[in-house]
Image (cartoon, rainbow, N blue to C red):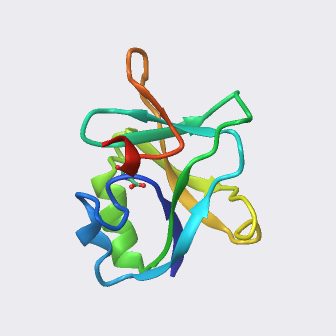
Amino acid sequence: MTLIFVYGTLMRGGQNHHYLAQQQFIGPARTRPGFTLYSLGAYPGMVASTDQQHAVNGEIWSVDEPTLKKLDDLEGVAEQLYARQPISLAPPCAQQTVQTYIYLRDLSGRPHLGANWQSSR
Ligand code: PCA
């Protein structure tokens, strides 16, 4: 099992949430400061932020190996759209080793969302 922090369309109520339907919800979580969201239209991208005031809200899920592969395909890891990498979460989840999808492409002209995807739709 792998713990994954999701912040966009994979969250409950999100367009791609069905990928996680048979997986285990661990709980809501927030990143440590230093991350922020941009809108890519139908989905968000999280990137490191130099502004330490920013953090991102999402959910931790425990996913099995086949699901993790499907998520990597969905997020375009092979195409370097997103990279799946470890992320530091804020307390009380700070001890958990969790991975997330970090957006890799150009964000110029993209709307800055800040902490939340849900509330910005
Ligand atoms: N799906 C992934 C990354 C961005 C997106 O829309 C997620 O929900 O975490």
The residue that appears at 23% across and 57% down in the rendered structure is 15
- Where is the C terminus found, in terms of image quarters? top left
Q: Quadrant of residue 99?
A: bottom right
When the figure is inspected, residue 83 is found, relative to residue 18, above or below; the finding is: above
Residue in the foreground of this view, choosing between 75 and 22: 22
Residue in the foreground of this view, choosing between 2 and 31: 31
When the figure is inspected, residue 5 is found, relative to residue 42, above or below; the finding is: below
**Residue 116 in the image, given as x and y percentages of width and height:** 47, 46
The residue that appears at 42% across and 22% down in the rendered structure is 106
The residue that appears at 28% across and 55% down in the rendered structure is 74
Horizontal placement of 38 versus 31: left or right?
A: left
When the figure is inspected, residue 109 is found, relative to residue 86, above or below; the finding is: above
**Residue 108 in the image, given as x and y percentages of width and height:** 42, 16
Outermost residue on the top side: it is 109
**Residue 17 in the image, given as x and y percentages of width and height:** 28, 66
Horizontal placement of 76 versus 93: left or right?
A: left
When the figure is inspected, residue 38 is found, relative to residue 72, above or below; the finding is: above
**Residue 22 in the image, given as x and y percentages of width and height:** 31, 84
